[in-house]
């Protein structure tokens, strides 16, 4: 396995994980990569490692360039184990190397890797840098993007930003740059990544983008997926991040539901009809069969969500309760919503859905619609009307 030189003496030495399909709940149908980078100068620095099962792959790629024992620095941009998981293997191979991390990173390394007390770890903060020779590395703490320990590393001489999870995409590909990928929508993957990983921290993303606005960057190297080097590709992903972080949304609605004997689904279809007839782009997801991470991506830039469920034991179906719990954790801003559902006797699903949405800070703009057992024509008609009214409200916003 060989390193890939992405710029003179700067190498990608990461790993490609073609088989991962569930990344702590994030569904990854196209796998991912764990990107680590090696900067070779008078001193050498490894920026991030890879998930531990891939440590031999990392070491083999480093070995294709240099003896890992001669590594001078291990830069830990983020301790989450998809990036730091091979740190112990690297330190075993290069016991003299100094580890660089933020203060939180140092604390988290000790909490993850027992024995790391023996490592020479230096905590860095904003403004700190490291001279490697002709090149240097500047450290840019980026707390909560998306962990408290996160930092970006910037090489001013090469104008490369190593942005860790920022600008990442879960996609397994042997290509290293966006411009080499012809048959996959990288920005759509970056959008899914943003929606599921960075959305809760959007205000911090906006601040970080403003902070880095005047930093000259020729290559953005995230820790997952491909890097961006063409000016237009960098502008495209940065501008997409600006829009997502600002909460910009489209005239789009997302219907999210689960159904027991198709009553709730019939209502969902009638609402969908009203939304489409009202001229609004609509997405339609049965939670039983849909990828929650994909739904989160669609919610990211939708103006409205409409959530429905059959009633089970005075509450929504578990898929609906689970998804709403997940959605709340993502803290979407500026959405409008409505609830609908079916029941047989006691009811309760719609009430619980409404409470979830309210506690997520989503504005409910319609009275919920419920039906007892199978929806009669007048209920389906009311559902269509609700869809049409939501479409109007979307267009007014
Ligand atoms: Fe890709 Fe937060 O780790």
Image (cartoon, rainbow, N blue to C red):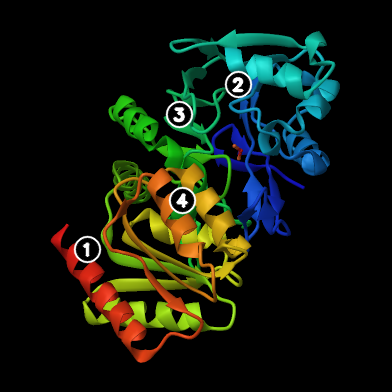
Query: Which of the two discs, 2 and 3, labels the residue nearer the N terminus?
Result: 2
When asked about the image quadrant of residue 103, the answer is top right
Q: Give the quarter of the figure containing the C terminus.
A: bottom left
User: Along the polypeptide, which appears first: circle 2 or circle 1?
Assistant: 2
Residue linked to disc 4 = 356
Q: Which residue is denoted by mark 3 in the rendering?
A: 158
Calculate the distance from the C-alpha at mark 2 to the C-alpha at mark 4: 54 Å
Looking at marks 1 and 4 on the same chain, the residue that comes earlier in the sequence is marked by: 4
- Is disc 3 surrounded by few (<14), some (14 to 19) or many (20+) residues within 10 Å? some
Q: Earlier in the sequence, mark 1 or mark 3?
A: 3
Can you identify the residue that label 2 sits on? 41
Q: Looking at the image, is mark 2 or mark 4 earlier in the sequence? A: 2
* 68 relative position to 267: left or right: right
> Gap between marks 1 and 3, in whole Å?
45 Å
Dot in front, 3 or 4: 4
Where 104 sits versus 315, above or below?
A: above
Judge the density around disc 2: few (<14), some (14-19), many (≥20) Cα neighbours within 10 Å: some
| Front residue of 147 and 177 | 147
Classed neighbour count for the residue bearing mark 4: other residues with Cα under 10 Å, few (<14), some (14–19), many (≥20):
some
Residue sitting at x 51%, y 67%? 347
Q: Residues within 10 Å of mark 1 (few under 14, many from 20)?
A: many
- 1 vs 3, front mark: 1
Observer-nearest of 385 and 178:
385
| Spatial separation of the CA atoms under disc 2 and disc 1 | 55 Å
């Amino acid at each position: 396995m060989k390193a890939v030189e992405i710029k003179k003496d700067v190498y990608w030495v990461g790993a490609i994980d073609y088989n991962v399909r569930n990344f702590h709940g994030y569904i990854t149908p196209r796998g991912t990569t764990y990107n680590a980078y090696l900067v070779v100068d008078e001193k050498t620095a490894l920026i991030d490692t890879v998930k531990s099962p891939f440590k031999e792959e990392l070491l083999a790629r480093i070995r294709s360039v240099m003896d890992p024992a001669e590594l001078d620095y291990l830069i830990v941009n983020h301790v989450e184990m998809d990036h730091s998981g091979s740190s112990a293997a690297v330190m075993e191979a290069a016991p003299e190397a100094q580890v660089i991390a933020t203060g939180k990173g140092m604390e988290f390394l000790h909490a993850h890797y027992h024995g790391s007390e023996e490592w020479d770890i230096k905590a860095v903060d904003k403004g700190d840098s490291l001279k490697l020779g002709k090149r240097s590395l500047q450290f840019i703490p980026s707390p909560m993007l998306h962990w408290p320990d996160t930092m970006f590393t910037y090489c001013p001489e090469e104008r490369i930003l190593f942005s860790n999870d920022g600008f990442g995409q879960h996609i397994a590909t042997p290509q290293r740059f966006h411009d080499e990928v012809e048959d996959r929508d990288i920005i759509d993957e970056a959008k899914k990544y943003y929606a599921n990983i960075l959305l809760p921290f959007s205000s911090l993303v906006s601040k970080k983008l403003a902070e880095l606005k005047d930093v000259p960057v020729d290559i953005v190297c995230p820790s997952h997926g491909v890097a961006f080097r063409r000016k237009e590709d960098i502008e495209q992903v940065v501008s997409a991040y600006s829009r997502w972080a600002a909460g910009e949304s489209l005239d789009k609605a997302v219907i999210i539901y689960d159904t027991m004997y198709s009553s709730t689904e019939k209502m969902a279809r009638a609402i969908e009809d009203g939304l489409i007839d009202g001229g609004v782009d609509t997405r339609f997801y049965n939670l039983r069969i849909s990828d929650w991470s994909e739904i989160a991506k669609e919610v990211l830039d939708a103006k409205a969500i409409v959530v429905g469920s059959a009633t089970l034991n005075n509450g929504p179906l578990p898929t609906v309760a689970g998804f709403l719990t997940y959605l709340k954790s993502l803290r979407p801003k500026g959405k409008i919503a409505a609830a609908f559902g079916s029941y047989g006797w006691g009811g309760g699903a719609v009430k619980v859905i409404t409470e979830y949405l309210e506690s997520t800070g989503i504005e409910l703009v319609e009275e919920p619609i419920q039906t007892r057992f199978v929806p009669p024509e007048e209920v389906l008609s009311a559902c269509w009307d609700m869809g049409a009214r939501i479409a109007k409200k979307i267009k007014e916003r």
